[in-house]
């Protein structure tokens, strides 16, 4: 199989790139290792297990929402928030403090990836294609896949690596090798949120709203360290979501049922003993997902890294290998907006 441009990775960055190449009438194929598109974007029945928000000033995300006709609403923050630590039991904090505007997509953030997919011809997208080897030859770059994927390699003039650089470094072999400097650079770039885990707790009714609570809570006891309202704007599903604390190693030591029980107890501790029983609790630990996270991502990050494309990773193989993906974005790296920036950056590097 042959193409001019091969995009590796069907997260929002790779899909946005594919959308832009479609608009420019360029020849391309997109290969994705998973059996679904979206990458870190993962919405189940309207509830987000990966990213949730974008923020004011992130104009590419808001423009794309308009372009794809995606209804957007402000994160529900009305009402007091709650706080707990070893000395403080479920303290109410008035809502005017600590509020920050953020936006969500009606139906979940996968509306963006679904909307992009709808604009791309389906024969340009190949799912279940996990790239293992990339080789430079006189006739172009040959990309091969894991045995479970396919035996048919793809030859391309230009390759777009729309995935976290650590996944490229750890899971893809290059022939000839990229060299120590490039490999070191790739490994040094943390994959944003790769070591995180999220829990979505669904309820029949948004009971916290009846108590003039925003649903937002901060805890130094856990297991959830930060909780927010995850409900749709005006109807079901109704849910809270929280980031689970601890390191990936600590989380691995706990059975899922134990963790769910501890989450239920925490919700009761925070919101009161008459809290209704959750309809269900869904947990997604991204640190255990091999198509997002590597061993290098097991140490929690203390702050948002300074992202961007390191010098060593520019103009590889005379410009035939181009990085995309939020971790190499020239602005807003790590975020959804950064994934769009990175795709635009990658296009500007095309020959
Ligand atoms: C829990 C969590 C919460 C977050 N919250 C927010 C938020 O609220 N707001 C925000 O802006 N950002 C948030 N983020 C970050 C956001 O998810 C990312 O910025 C964005 O999704 C990155 O998109 P991407 O396309 O660059 O990478 P990815 O989504 O990681 O896409 C890479 C793709 O490459 C594929 N792939 C991997 N290896 C191979 C291979 N060998 N061959 C072929 N394909 C391969 C993967 O399957 C994946 O589909 C969050 C992330 C997580 C995990």
Image (cartoon, helix red, strand yellow):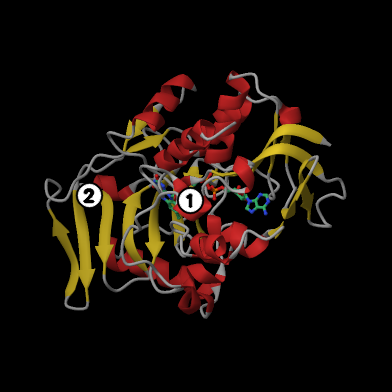
In depth, the one of 23 and 194 nearer the eye is: 23
- Pick the quarter of the image with the N terminus: top right
Is any part of residue 159 visible from this angle? yes
Answer left or right for 295 relative to 226.
right
In depth, the one of 25 and 57 nearer the eye is: 25
Q: Earlier in the sequence, mark 2 or mark 1?
A: 1
SS label for mark 2: loop
- Pick the quarter of the image with the C terminus: top right
In this rendering, is residue 20 above or below 289? above
Residue receiving disc 2? 211
Query: Separation of disc 2 and disc 1 at Cα?
Result: 28 Å
The picture places residue 40, in percent across and down from the top left corner, at 53, 50
Crowding at mark 1 (Cα within 10 Å: few <14, some 14-19, many 20+): many
On residue 50, which mark appears? 1
- The yes-or-no answer for disc 1 within 8 Å of ligand 1 is yes
On residue 185, which mark appears? none
When asked about the image quadrant of residue 217, the answer is bottom left
The picture places residue 154, in percent across and down from the top left corner, at 80, 42
Answer left or right for 90 relative to 254.
left
Residue at 87 percent across and 50 percent down: it is 151
Is any part of residue 108 visible from this angle? no
In this rendering, is residue 127 above or below 255? above
The picture places residue 116, in percent across and down from the top left corner, at 57, 29
- Dots 2, 1 in contact, CB < 8 A: no
In depth, the one of 332 and 291 nearer the eye is: 332
Residue at 16 percent across and 78 percent down: it is 87
When asked about the image quadrant of residue 336, the answer is top left
Answer left or right for 53 relative to 208.
right
The picture places residue 324, in percent across and down from the top left corner, at 53, 43
Residue lying at the far right of the rendered structure: 151
Residue at 60 percent across and 61 percent down: it is 169
SS label for mark 1: loop
């Amino acid at each position: 199989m042959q193409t001019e441009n091969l995009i590796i990775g069907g997260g929002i960055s790779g899909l946005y790139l594919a959308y832009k190449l479609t608009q420019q009438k360029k020849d391309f194929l997109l290969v994705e290792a998973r059996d679904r598109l979206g990458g870190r974007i993962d919405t189940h029945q309207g509830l987000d297990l990966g990213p949730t928000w974008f923020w004011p000033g992130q104009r590419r995300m808001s423009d794309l929402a308009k372009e794809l006709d995606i209804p957007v609403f402000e994160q529900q923050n009305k009402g007091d928030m709650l706080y707990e630590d070893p000395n403080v039991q479920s303290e109410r904090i008035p809502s005017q403090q600590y509020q920050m505007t953020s936006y969500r997509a009606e139906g979940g953030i996968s509306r963006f990836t679904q909307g992009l997919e709808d604009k791309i011809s389906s024969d340009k997208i190949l799912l279940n294609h996990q790239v293992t080897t990339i080789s430079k030859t006189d006739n172009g770059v040959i990309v091969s896949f894991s045995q479970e994927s396919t035996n048919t390699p793809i030859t391309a003039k230009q390759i777009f690596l729309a995935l976290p650089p650590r996944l490229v470094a750890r899971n893809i072999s290059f022939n000839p090798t990229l060299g120590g400097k490039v490999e070191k650079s790739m490994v040094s770039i943390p994959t944003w949120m790769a070591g995180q885990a999220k829990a979505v707790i669904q309820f029949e009714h948004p009971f916290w709203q009846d108590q003039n609570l925003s649903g937002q809570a901060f805890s130094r006891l856990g297991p959830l360290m930060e909780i927010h309202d995850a409900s749709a704007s005006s109807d079901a599903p109704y849910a809270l979501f929280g980031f689970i604390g601890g390191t990936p190693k600590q989380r691995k030591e706990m059975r899922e049922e134990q963790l769910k029980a501890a989450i239920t107890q925490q919700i009761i501790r925070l919101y009161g003993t008459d809290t209704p029983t959750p309809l269900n609790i869904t947990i997604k630990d991204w640190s255990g997902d091999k198509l997002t996270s590597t061993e290098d991502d097991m140490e929690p990050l203390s702050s948002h890294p300074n992202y961007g494309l390191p010098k060593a990773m520019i103009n590889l193989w005379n410009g035939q290998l181009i990085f995309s993906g939020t971790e190499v974005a020239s602005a807003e790296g790590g975020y959804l907006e950064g994934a769009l920036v990175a795709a635009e950056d990658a296009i500007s590097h095309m020959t």
